[in-house]
Image: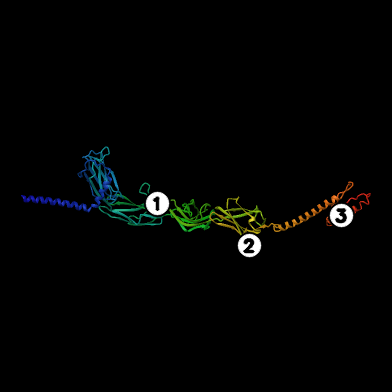
């Protein structure tokens, strides 16, 4: 008796161990997949409250299959919710690609809910997990999510494309594989359509029936829209059951970016000055769009990295675009980075880069004046007067300094520089700082970039000269003063002699009566020479009269005439 009892216990232990290993082997075989579905379930039911009721018993779950063919077969699920006060139920499928599907089950009475799931053409293949949620009238979940089942989706058709993205001009190649698995005998035909909506789709390409390999070109006439999804439409019919199914295999027709032909980019002139007109010409093409629909824009980045305003090019025909532009006067000189972009109507984008050299405009000297006289010919200025220069100069950017340089015949330079303040800028040179003679004029103008324009040819002629006329009397001033002193000395001596004799003879003469005398005659220049001689003769004559005065008292006195 004890021996039989021992055998029974051993048998029970053996059965338990066998069950344990069976479960272990099953879990080991599908462990990764089961863990994946478990994770998905936990993620997708995280909003279910922990206070939910009991789990749906497996005895309340029914399904009619475990493996189904996509499109032609379906699977039925039925659950019994008699253990719950259910208002509605939802079946949730966690697909093999990670997506979720929620399906409202239909109440069929007797506390039962039903749903028939028929995989669409794009349903994921493989192992799918299924769970159920029981809700009350307050939309609260009544069951915990521990009860789940699964099924497998398989397919007996497949299309292999050589690519999924195509451009106008490409060639699409594909292979079709259809197998008559199960009780099926398939027939099919293939078309290319622009939509999966049967009401609005348009057949673009019709292929031969029952073809298993096909190729067709992607042409703009057929695929007029780009950046769009098109479909290979497979119409499958089962000869035995008469069932018909439609399968769509999508592919993309993408936009080809427009292109700028770098070799065609030309600037005229190749090196430009600021504010100078420059023309850019280039060619741009696009496969899908006409060139007239392209938008070509020029972007300039100056030598300091600052961007100028974009410049839109104009279509000139024959894929050619051009525009005339200029660099502002205030922009820096140097090498500019040039980017040319082209954009089509489908938002396709292309670009090309190059460089452009921008140089400084030299300042210009239009004319200048000296003391208000235009310097188009030599002029003369008296020594001691100031030389005042005024200028008519200009520069696209900015004139900063003006310099006047004078050089004489002895190669002696006289330089003077001043800041340019506009049309009223003047330079004044004092001639007393220069020596007399001819000074040749050179004018220099310096702009804000340090560029110098020098007027050394003076309007294509030799440098004009300013002649400083010396004071001709200054060299003889000493001698002139000397001779004037001598003359003044002589005249002073003569005057003193005259005064002396006048006073002497004025005392000897005592006239008896006053007689009117005629005014003395003016001496001519010739009689001035004998002045001294005549005075001597008159003196002798007077002495004779005095000696005979006593002898001849009755004789009246004779008037002495003086010749002055």
Q: Nearer the viewer, residue 15 or 399?
A: 399
The reply to whether residue 257 is in sight is yes
The Cα–Cα distance between marks 1 and 2, rounded to whole angstroms, is 84 Å
Compare marks 2 and 3 and give the one earlier in the sequence.
2
Residue density around tag 2, few if under 14, some if 14–19, many if 20 or more, within 10 Å:
few
Of mark 1 and mark 3, the one earlier in the sequence is: 1
Q: Position of residue 292 (x, y in %)?
A: 48, 52
Q: Residues within 10 Å of mark 1 (few under 14, many from 20)?
A: some
Which dot, 1 or 2, sits closer to the camera? 2
Q: CA distance from mark 2 to mark 3?
A: 70 Å
In the picture, the disc for residue 227 is: 1
User: Toward the viewer: 336 or 112?
Assistant: 336
Q: In the rendered structure, find residue 539 and report the number of the disc placed on it.
A: 3
Which element is circle 2 on? loop
Side of 467 relative to 153 (left or right): right
x then y, percent, for residue 311: 49, 52
Lower position in the chain sequence, tag 1 or tag 2: 1
Q: Is residue 176 above or below residue 77?
A: below
Q: Secondary structure at mark 1?
A: loop
- The percent coordinates of residue 174 (x first, y second) are 34, 56
The residue that label 2 is drawn on is 410
User: Would residue 526 be seen by someone viewing this image from the given angle?
Assistant: no
Q: What crowding class fits label 3: few (fewer than 14 Cα within 10 Å), some (14-19), or many (20 or more)? A: few
1 and 3 marks in contact (CB < 8 Å): no
Residue sitting at the far top: 137
Image height of 62 relative to 216, above or below = above
Residue 533 rendering spot, x and y as whole percentages: 85, 57
Residue at the bottom extreme, as displayed: 410
């Amino acid at each position: 008796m004890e021996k039989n009892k021992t055998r029974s216990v051993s048998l029970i232990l053996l059965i338990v161990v066998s069950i344990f290993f069976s479960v272990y082997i099953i879990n080991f075989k599908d462990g990764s997949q089961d863990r994946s579905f478990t994770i998905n379930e936990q993620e997708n039911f995280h909003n279910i409250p922990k206070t939910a009721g009991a789990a749906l018993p497996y005895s309340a779950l029914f399904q009619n299959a475990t493996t189904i063919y996509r499109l032609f077969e379906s699977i039925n699920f039925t659950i019994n919710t008699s253990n719950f006060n259910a208002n509605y139920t939802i079946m949730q499928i966690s697909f093999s690609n990670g997506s979720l599907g929620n399906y409202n089950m239909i109440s069929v009475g007797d506390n039962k809910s039903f749903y028939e799931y028929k995989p669409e053409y794009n349903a994921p293949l493989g192992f799918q997990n299924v769970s159920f949620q029981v809700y009350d009238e307050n939309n609260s979940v009544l069951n915990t999510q521990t009860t789940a089942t699964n099924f497998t989706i398989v397919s007996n058709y497949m299309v292999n494309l050589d690519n999924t993205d195509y451009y106008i001009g490409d060639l699409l190649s594909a292979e079709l594989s259809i197998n008559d698995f199960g009780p099926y005998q398939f027939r099919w035909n293939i078309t290319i359509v622009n939509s999966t909506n049967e009401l609005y789709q348009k057949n673009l390409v019709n292929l031969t029936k029952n073809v298993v390999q096909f190729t067709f070109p992607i042409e703009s006439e057929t695929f007029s829209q780009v950046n769009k999804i098109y479909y290979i439409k497979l119409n499958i019919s089962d000869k035995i059951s008469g069932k018909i199914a439609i399968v769509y295999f999508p592919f993309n027709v993408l936009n080809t970016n427009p292109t700028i032909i770098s070799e065609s980019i030309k600037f005229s002139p190749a090196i430009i000055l600021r504010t100078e007109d420059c023309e850019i010409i280039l060619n741009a093409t696009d496969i899908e769009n006409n060139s007239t629909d392209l938008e070509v824009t020029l972007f300039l980045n100056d030598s300091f990295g600052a961007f100028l305003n974009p410049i839109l090019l104009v279509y000139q025909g024959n894929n050619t675009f051009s525009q005339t532009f200029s660099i502002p006067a205030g922009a820096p000189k140097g090498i500019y980075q040039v980017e040319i972009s082209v954009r089509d109507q489908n938002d396709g984008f292309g670009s090309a880069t190059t460089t452009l050299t921008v140089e400084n405009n030299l300042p210009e000297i239009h004319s200048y004046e000296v003391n208000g006289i235009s310097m188009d010919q030599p002029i003369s200025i008296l020594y001691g007067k100031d030389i005042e220069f005024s200028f008519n100069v200009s520069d696209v950017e900015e004139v900063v300094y003006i310099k006047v340089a004078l050089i004489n015949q002895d190669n002696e330079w006289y330089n003077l520089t001043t800041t340019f303040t506009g049309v009223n800028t003047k330079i004044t040179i004092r001639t007393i700082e220069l020596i007399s003679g001819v000074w040749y004029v050179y004018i220099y103008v310096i702009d804000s970039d340090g560029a110098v324009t020098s007027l050394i040819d003076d309007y294509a002629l030799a440098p004009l000269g300013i002649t400083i006329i010396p004071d001709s009397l200054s060299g003889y001033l000493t001698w002139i003063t000397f001779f004037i002193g001598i003359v003044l000395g002589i005249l002073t001596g003569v005057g003193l002699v005259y005064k002396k004799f006048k006073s002497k003879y004025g005392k000897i003469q005592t006239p008896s009566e006053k007689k009117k005398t005629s005014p003395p005659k003016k001496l001519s220049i010739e009689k001035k020479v004998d002045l001294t001689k005549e005075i001597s003769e008159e003196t002798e004559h007077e002495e004779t009269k005095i000696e005979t005065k006593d002898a001849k008292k009755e004789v009246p006195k004779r008037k002495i005439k003086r010749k002055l």
